[in-house]
Amino acid sequence: MKFLGLILKSARRSKRRTALTVLSVAIAIFLFASLRAVLDGFNAATEASSATRIVTQRSTSLFFSMPTSHADLIRNTPGVQDLTWASWFGGIYKDPQNFFAQFAVEPESYLRLYPEIQLTPAERAAFLEDRTGCIVGDGLAKRYGFKVGDKMTLRVGIPTYGTQDFDFNIRAIYHSAGAAVDNQSMMFHWKYADERSLRKGQVGWYVAQISNPDRAAQIAGDIDRKFANSPNETKTETEQAFQSSFVSMFGNLNLLLGSIMVAVVISTLFVSANTMAMSVRERTTEIAVMRTLGFQSGTVFLLIAGEALLMSLIGGALGVLLARAIVNPDFLQAGTFVPELRVHASNLAVALSLSAVIGVLAGAIPATMASRLKIVDALRRIA
Amino acid sequence: MALIELRGVTKKYKRDAIEIPVLERVSIAVDEGDFLGLMGPSGSGKSTLLNLLAGIDRPTSGTIQIGDTEISNLSERALATWRARHIGFIFQLYNLIPVLTAYENVELPLLLTQLSKKQRRDHVMTALTIVGLGDREKHYPRQLSGGQEQRVAIARAIVTDPTLLLADEPTGDLDAKSGGEVLTLLQRLNQEFKKTIVMVTHDPHAAERATHTLHLEKGTLVEQGGVSA
């Protein structure tokens, strides 16, 4: 502790340089924590997926639909307890930039299979009874100021649904009890969309409730075999796999965002290491004087490394505080597909640890240089 | 009884393949309580001799005994510990740490001891009072004159009550008045506090303050004044 004052004084030697170094670490850690929050958001839905729900889609792509006639065949598959379906609507709310997910769902069974969608009995009844009724997530409601009883009009975004605008009554604002369902979506009656659809009786995907998660693969195989060699072959997978493949449509996010994170952290490491090296070079005489006074080379190493660590940790703390303040649903709306955009405690811990690693690595070489300094040579340099 | 004993000390530096002799078989004995002035032209080896006495450089051959310790055999680690306990070093350019106050500069060697904060404060204030700067503890080096800076450096050198004070041209960067004050202070440390001092100087007037003088030329002792060589 008695050396802490010495470390602090040394760090304040060049206030501008120290501030810039701290800031560069802060920005790197902010970016790291923010990008990780995005990945966490994507992964949250996957991790929270139900083990007892399996999803059937067209084998070719999620973009292609299937006939409703598949419903009975899937429902009759041994092991399937319940079934619902949904379609992507793709409507436009006032402006194409106001993007959020809208699902045309079979309402009764959908609410049954997704208990994560929390509604009061009265809200549930109001939604089910109104053919043009819809429910919106509380996140979406907050974003656009929706209230129960409001009317909402969506322009058609996918030509299949004709050209006429769709009017909706907001019957409830749901709260999501799990990351498998985000709070940024809107759901309405599939029949309402279907009656205006140019291709009647089409469904985007089916969701089946199964009794035994251990039999998911077998049941999925049984379902797909029923439609093999038909014009509408299917691909059935667990909800978790479905979520993963949905996320993968954005590309390999782990690789993409991970690469950015690594690049940012490494460049910051070089900046910090260079700053510390400059600082040590400027202090050559002082270090020689301290060694003359009897400071051990190990103590000198710890003083320099401690200074780098301290600067990096302060930067890291600033970075995570900034990330915590900015990357949260109250401040930043990322859109529909990232259900939970917030910096979790584990993310903070990793980011802070990373700042410590940056500090240790950035300080290691300059600290070694300082500790190995030959006193006489260093003193002669200025004599 | 001799506090310092150098026997046949030779120091050579290597520059690429060339060996440059700096000291040639120097033998000196300095008694406890002496104030030795080391004189000689530039390049004569006097600073090198001082560095060897301080244990910040090692002889190529020969032995250096200070008190009971044969320092040429000590490891780097042991040598650092020994320096902290036994050596007070005064540099020509003061070499105070610019970001530390006078108090903190003087306290620096005490951070290596087990003294409490209060004990360290007592030691620092005593040292600053001895050099006449008890009221400047909060001043940074840039706020002090050259003479004051050197007096803070002397306080730093004496704060651990070392066995030996080594001064490398302590007045070399000072005007005559400040230099005179520093020399008076060194004399007082020698006479009043019985400190053994070895001072390197170019200045014959400065050397006059010493109780003995030795002259080095081209790495060998050419003259002695009251010191066994």
Image (cartoon, coloured by chain):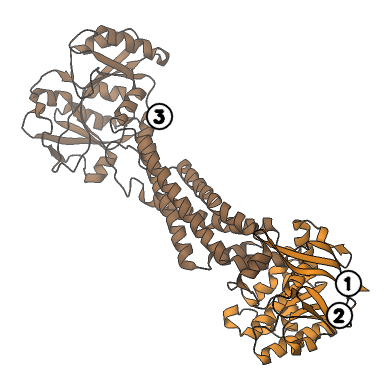
Q: Identity of the amino acid at label 2?
A: Asp
Residue A376 lies, in percent from the top left, at 68, 66
Q: Quadrant of residue A82?
A: top left
Instruction: Tell me the quarter of the image containing the N terminus of chain A.
Output: bottom right
> Chain A is which colour?
brown
Q: Quadrant of the C terminus of chain A?
A: bottom right
**Depth order, front residue of B3/B49:** B49
Q: Earlier in the sequence, mark 1 or mark 2?
A: 1
| Residue at 41% from the left image edge and 48% from the top image edge | A264
Q: Please name the residue shown 65% across and 84% down the image.
A: B148
Looking at the image, do the residues carrying marks 1 and 2 touch, with CB atoms under 8 Å apart?
Answer: yes
Residue that label 2 marks: B34
The amino acid marked with disc number 1 is Leu
From this viewpoint, is residue B128 visible?
A: yes
Q: CA distance from mark 3 to mark 2?
A: 81 Å
Q: Residue furthest bottom?
A: B177
Disc 3 target residue: A47
Residue topped by disc 1: B3
Viewer can see residue B122: no
What secondary structure is marked by label 3? helix
Observer-nearest of B227 and A288: B227
Say which chain is orange.
B
10 Å crowding of disc 2: few (<14), some (14-19), many (20+): many
